[in-house]
Amino acid sequence: MTHTISKITTDIKEFPLEAGDGTDSIHTDPVYSYIVTHLHTDSSVCGTGIVFTLGAGNQEIRSLIEGLVQPLVGREVEELMSQFGDCFKQLAEHPRYRWLGPHKGMIHLALASITNACYDLWAKTHGVPLWKLLNDLTPEQIVDTLDLSYLEDELTREDAILLLKENRAGREERSGIIEKGYPGYDTSIGWFNYSDEQVKDNVRRAVETGFKDMKLKVGSPETERDVRRAYLVREAAGDDARVMLDVNQSWSLPKAIRTSKALAGMSPFWIEEPTQPDDVIGHQTLAKEIDPIDIALGEHVSNRVMFKNFMQARAVTYVQVDCTRVGGISEFITVSLLARKFGLTVVPHVGDMGQIHQHLVLFNHISMGHDALFLEHIPHLRKYFLHPALVEDGIYKTPQEPGSSSDFV
């Protein structure tokens, strides 16, 4: 049976949060939001794609989606996805819209929503969850969905296919994670505007519900506040917990060096987004200065070329590529391949609240051989998704419904 895209609609979903939820050192009043692309077909199967914002620019992104997406009308799904890399490149290189990026900002977020809808639709037409669809594809089929332009110095088409073929060894053993589930870590214990007492209570609750690892928001004007709260989490979580510290870009490079060293005694697992997200050399300098503390970044790294530069500079250890920040699932897979080549671990940022990424990390682990370290868990929007990510005892349970888990109630 064939499935042809017959109509495209868009939507905006906005979810105000409880006081303090979602806050960090930069973003103090978030409204978790999604700009949604719906790809309708003549067979009544509908693909849903999402991209994440904090509540501003939603209508503008929606308009960009409606302008970019029109070439998909009339395309048969299997034919489209068999050469999606070419389609992705054509959309990203639109001779007029490209000027608004290129490959970043609202134009790239619009592309992400479209791309994610394509993959969701593809999985639904096969009647399988996205993780299974991706793991069942051949290396050549996977690479046909990617745009590898501007990466030829590090990752050619032939390199990507070979990397996937080489990692077929061990797939059966790694597939055991489908039954076991993928480990999670708790981001919601330490939002920036939470009181110290609330943070302590949240850590205790996280440990009781099975989380061994968690993240605290730092980046205060007063370094003493960050140090106090970091040690508070370490004491409450215990010496064996992996505690990540997330700056959300608020430090200058000199302050990042000073404060990271001041925090070294509580053994942070990583320092996340320590400074301006486009400053590759700044992160490279910081990585050398604070070694052996590791740097994580990617929440605001907008495309594969920037990720390539960070990897080439050895300015990152944990790659937090997010399919709702780069150009969707296609570019996420591309960055994951780059990271695998550089021997780096992918731990996605979850602007999707883990809905799509719970599928993508299974693909990364099974088909690419990435370590199954853990996946960020943010629980605030569970009730709004039709098939919310299920996390029990700190473990993501493997989704079974067809698609990418992106549909709303």
Image (cartoon, helix red, strand yellow):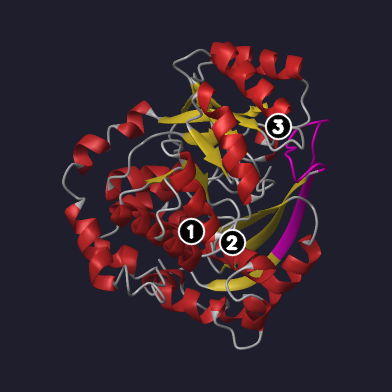
Q: Is residue 159 magenta?
A: no
Q: Any mark on residue 278, and which?
A: 2
Q: Amino acid at mark 2?
A: Asp
Residue 363 rendering spot, x and y as whole percentages: 36, 47
Marks 3 and 2, the one that precedes in the sequence: 3
Disc 2 crowd, CA 10 A, few/some/many (<14, 14-19, 20+): some
Q: Residue 95 appears in which quarter of the rendering? A: bottom right
Vertical placement of residue 169 versus 10, above or below: above
Task: Report the predominant secondary structure element of the magenta stretch.
Answer: loop
Disc 3 crowd, CA 10 A, few/some/many (<14, 14-19, 20+): some
Q: Residue at x 64, y 72 (%)?
A: 7
Decide if residue 147 is on the left or right side of residue 254.
left
Q: Amino acid at mark 1?
A: Ile
Give the residue pinned by disc 3: 223
| Image quadrant containing the N terminus | bottom left
Q: Is residue 74 visible?
A: no
Determine the CA span between mark 1 and mark 2: 22 Å
Q: Secondary structure at mark 3?
A: helix
- Please report the bounds of the magenta region as a residue range: 10-29
Q: Is residue 75 visible?
A: yes
Residue 211 rendering spot, x and y as whole percentages: 51, 20
Q: 65 or 78: which is nearer to us?
A: 65
Residue 17 rendering spot, x and y as whole percentages: 79, 36
Determine the CA span between mark 3 and mark 1: 37 Å
Give the residue pinned by disc 1: 329
Marks 3 and 1, the one that precedes in the sequence: 3
Marks 1 and 2, the one that precedes in the sequence: 2
